[in-house]
Amino acid sequence: MPDLLGQTTQSDDNLVGPYESWMFDAGKIYDLPGLMLGDACSLSCVAEFKSPIPVEQIGPASKVYQDDGGRMRLRLPPIYAPGGFVSKFVPFMLTPVTASDTDNDLNQLGSDTIRQVLERFRGAASDTAGIQGLCRVNFPILSESVDTQYPGGNGTEATRDPELDPSKPIVIVAIIDHGIPFAHGNFRYKDSLFTRVDYCWSQSALADHAGDVPFGREFNRESIDTMVGNGKAGFHGDEDAIYRAAGVLTRPGRPPMPLDRLHSHGAHVLDTLAGNWPIDIEAQVRIIAVDLPSSSTWETSGFGKDMFVLSAMHYIFERARKIAQTYNVAELPLVVNLSYGYSGGPHDGTGLIEDAFDELLTARRVHAPTALVMPSGNMFQDRLHALVTNDHFSDDPDGPNKIASVQWFAPPNDRTSSFLEIWYPVGTSFSDIGVAVYPPNAAIPALDTALSKTGEVTFFSANIEIDRAIVGQFTIDKYRGERWRVMIILAPTEPSGPDPENHHAAPAGNWTLRFVLPKNTAIPDFTPGEKSTPVSGGIQCRIQCDTSYGQGNTGARQGYFIDPRNDLYGQDGALAKVDWTGENAQGVDAKVRRFGSLNGMATFRNALVVAGHMESSHCAAPYSSAGSLRSKPDAYAGTQQGDMLATDKRVDLSAPTERSPWIPGIVAAGTRTGVTVAFQGTSSAAPEAARQLAALFLKDNMATTANNYLSLLCAASDQNVPADGEGADSKIRLGRTLLSRPSAR
Amino acid sequence: MSMLSLMHGMHGMHGMHGAGSGSAADGSDLAGLQSSTQAIVHAAGLEPIAAANVHDLLPDEPANMKRWAPEIRALLLQNGFIKQLGWSFDKASLQGTVTWGGTAIWQAKRPSNQTLAAQAGLVRNYVDQRADRSREILSQLGSFAAYFGIILGLNGPRNAKTFELLATVQSLAGEATMMPKHMFACRRPDEVDTRIMPLIQTPGHGAFPSAHATQAFAMAEVLAALVRANPLHFPDAEGRIKLLYRQAHRIAVNRTAAGVHFPMDSWAGAILGVQIGRILVGMMTGAGSLRASQMFDPNAAEDEDFFFTDFESRYLTAAKARSVVVDPLFGWLWAECQTEFGGLRPGAEG
């Protein structure tokens, strides 16, 4: 194996992946104390099986795992499993059997314990299906949110809304977000206090042990009407009292809850999607919402949110089916808005969560139109994406190799860990390309894989150490058994952990990654095609988002790549809108890329991806991410110098996210009825597209356009077609059409 | 007052202005007062005044501090502290020393040009944070006692003497750095690297050591002693003490974000500040004691940033060595401050 410093582990699968091995081992001391994981938390997980597996085969909910006195019970959330549909991907949770089981305190769990638990889960789940080799363990669920009475399964049947004339067409709009104000007036009928929200699953609400959902609380149309109403159990429209009773406000010892504030991400997005539909059709637009646990801490923790989002999707599909059954049809048209994302991921449609979504969408589209709408992301200018191609390598005069390096700036005062994913080209093995990691100002690397051909492991992990103290983690894993990924995780540059002896701050400043290739070899360049032939051009480096959002006060600071070839500003003095390509100067493209910064959760074909533009100019908002990679003509025959290749998922269309350069954001609802706020970002573009698509589904109940219904929206749009090229007014930034936002609702 | 304002415009006497002075008269008042007194003075008659049959003021008594204006008290305390302070610089070894009462309390080596260059790189790392920290940076150009007051729940009228103590500490700690700054004669970051271009005007004195760091850590040290001396006042005393030092650290780092100090300036200043804080606690209580001085060599780790946990483990937890004798004037101010905390305990009144 490579020559590495620090303690190393390796295995023939990556059941416990790079994020998990950091979060539950060396990195735990830095991050967990800030996450309020006091006692008896549950683990949230997603497993991928080699083949689809019926839920009943996974094991009864009473299954108990014994582990050195620590016992965990397997529990499944509501699962969409209509006749014949079986998934490869299973969201599940592992709950300590008793709250006093201190060995189950997450602060005591190490990755070896996690591995034992997951191996037993794999063993119990099936003799044949077996886990594919990737099991994500996501953000823990606090014990106060765990519903101990949840028996598993999908709960009781729905009832018809008496307000709705069943002879009229119906569409279901669904949202997965955080800070969902389900009692807000904009989601009630215009002439009454009755709600149009059929279901809301608040995943981090204090459990009421009603047995509807495994964690958090479910509110349905009847219970929302009761709370809002003037009856004995009602709060007469007092929304503060409603949310307090609903267990979704902050209390001592709880993480900050978004509905405490007058504005939330979820309120704005849900209002854009589902607020104030015209009175003549409002009853026909049904609402299902899932309120994720507040993202304020998980965004920077490395835990991720796959399990919560996948559970949400199953829940929405399952409850949508219940609603359909009350109207005696199998399924109703459904538009799901997911204004979420991240900057990491393989970006070729093969992310685990992307595949899981794709499988669900494909299964449901057999019965009814089903769309998933997502934002393109806000990372266009953030320098989180660097691409190293053959052009960047130069011969090492002192050796048989050629070398390319990338500078990664780790800012001071970052109180959270930082995560860098390096995706190797398809067709290469980790041993084909060496990596060395140099701390700021260091002449010798903290870690060097050299060039090694040994070993058939699929997971390898080593601590990065300076002066024999841990400052980070280096891993190599074969993501989903398909593509090699090197990950570098840095400790906080300003840690608040209690063990300064053995766990140091990662030095702030420029970290250097040096890639090493034998002189006579080349790395694969771009290949065209979508899912069947993934994009594999160059070495793709992606820094995960690491900013402090909302009231979380995580102390996160965003690192970024530094590249002298990458001009931040253009000749016009404005933020540069294009990447520096070889045609401009030294003949070599900049490594830092704006294009290719697309939301890493939205790179699969069936997602409808929405960028943001300015209402005043119809130009892309400066931050609005775009897909597609650039290549030079010798890399892919038939393209012109500097042409964009349609080699990966691109922006499909755009909607307004800014009114003008001097009037920021788009106005929609805050968390309380009557409050409005302006919000910036592509998160508000997606629900505008989702809303307009839902209106089209109402007109055409059996809309069946290929892939993601883009052509349906294009046909209905009267906006100008974006320009060619790659400017702020171009197709590559704005997609095939621009939606406008009605001036009044 | 005017002399103090001139001397300490930059270094923290601002907290003194107006503190405790409820009867200041402005120009129009003065004219009115003159015409009214001229109108009524005849009623006092023309008889000679008898020898005063009143209490004599006791000479050279700490209790007289109560009579003096706050800024005069500050001058007295400053003189009491400064008279024991000494400085020296050895041009051969390029190292400087600060002494107190004849004993070295702080020693440092002069940063080399190579160290300045390495440290400038660290300063650039912080440029991104100017947007976050600019409000603090600008408001900490003068007194920053409020940044500690907010941790201890201090209120202006209620804690007038505690704020006076803080202003005094900030003032004399700032002054104590001026001679070292002069002797070490170090360029500011923006003179080393043009890419730094500071958020505020580059100061007119040397970079090393940082006066902000010295002041902030001296203030934290004194307040920590005050909290510990009143164990029944705060239910969460240790947590507050931790924040006092954290705040001091943040104030120091704000100067790096502003582009006017290298991290090593903060190291040198914080070490000096903690020592000054301990001296002052000793002068006020007799309980404080001084740590043996260690040589700080910025060239030994030229790219070292100024992180709280590093400073804490090396300088805040080390044992104390030399004891300090009480100064009665400092003792008077300490006792006054005590009445704002311990004096509020049930049963402690009159």
Image (cartoon, coloured by chain):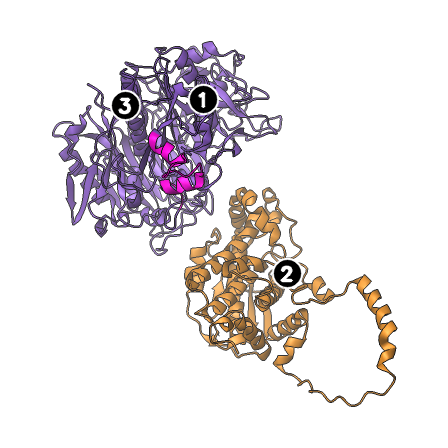
Q: Chain of mark 1?
A: A
Q: Nearer the viewer, mark 1 or mark 2?
A: 1
Viewer can see residue B101: no
| For residue A392, above or below residue B293 | above
Give the left or right position of residue B118, taking residue A291 as reference. Answer: right
Q: Nearer the viewer, mark 2 or mark 3?
A: 3
CA separation, marks 1 and 2?
54 Å
**Mark 2 — residue?**
B11
Closer to the camera, A184 or A562? Answer: A184
Secondary element at tag 2: loop
Kindly identify the residue that appears in the image at 44 percent across and 74 percent down: B321
Residue A660, image x and y in percent? Answer: 59, 26
**Mark 1 — residue?**
A610
Closer to the camera, A56 or B300? Answer: A56
Identity, as a three-letter code, of the amino acid under mark 1: Val
**Mark 3 — residue?**
A322
Q: Are marks 1 and 2 in contact (CB under 8 Å)?
A: no
Q: Colour of chain A?
A: purple
Q: Nearer the viewer, mark 3 or mark 1?
A: 3
Secondary element at tag 3: helix
Q: Which residues are magenta?
A: A222-250
In primary-sequence order, the first of circles 3 and 1 is 3
Q: Residues within 10 Å of mark 2 (few under 14, many from 20)?
A: many
CA separation, marks 2 and 3?
71 Å
